[in-house]
Amino acid sequence: MKRILLVVMMSVGLLPGLCLGQYKAPAENMMTRGWLNGRYWLTLDKANKSNFLMGVEAGTAVLYGLLVGDNTIYRKAGKEIEGLLRKNVLGTAGIIFGEVAQQVDDFYNDNTNIQIPISCAYWIITLKTSGASPIEIENQTAELRRAWDQSSR
C-alpha cells in the first residue's frame, strides 16, 4: 500500500511539469533551508504558478487522507484537519488559482518576504481569504520572516 501511495504521489508531482512546462532546477538562492522560496516563485510563468498551488492543495488533501487512516491518533488529527478544511482555513474556497497566484506575487513584491517558502506564503493567503485581521496577517508574516531569515542561521 505504501509503495502504491509513493508511486501515485510521485506521478502527481511530475504531471504539472510534464504537461505545462519545463522543470526549472532551483539555484541555491531560490531555496531557504531546502524549501522553494519567493525567488523561485518569481521565475515561474502564470500556468506553472497555478500548477504549484494546485500541488499545495493536492498535498493538503493527501495529508488529510493519510491522517484519517485506521490509527486512532491519526483519526483524531484527521478530524481536526477536516474541520479546518470545512472552515476553509487550509484552503481558498471559491477563489481560482490564478487569483491566488497574483496574491502570492503581491506577497513576494515585498522583498522582505523573499526568503519565506512558497507554501508559507500560500498559508498567509489562506489566512487572508479566511477573514483574518490585517494585524494577525502582519504578525504571522513577521513571525515567518524571523523563522526563515537566512542571516540568522
Image: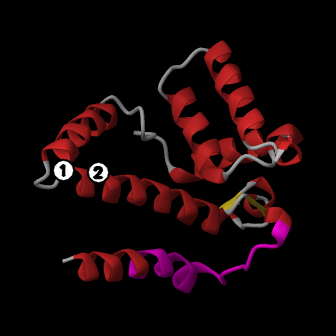
**Residue 84 falls left or right of residue 74:** right
Q: Secondary structure at mark 2?
A: helix
Q: Taking 81 as reference, is 131 above or below it?
A: above
- Residue located at (54% from left, 19% from top): 132
Is residue 116 shown above or below 9?
above
45 and 42: which one is in front? 42
Three-letter amino acid code of the residue under disc 2: Tyr
Residue at left offset 47%, top offset 80% = 15
Q: Which residues are the magenta region?
A: 11-28
Residue 25 image offset from top left, x and y in percent: 73, 79
Identify the element where label 1 is drawn.
loop
Display colour scheme: secondary structure
Categorize mark 1 by other alpha carbons within 10 Å: few (<14), some (14-19), many (20+): some
* Amino acid residing under circle 1: Val
Q: Which residue is mark 1?
A: 68
Specify the farthest residue to the front: 153
Percent coordinates x, y for residue 68 in the rendering: 18, 50
2 and 1 marks in contact (CB < 8 Å): yes
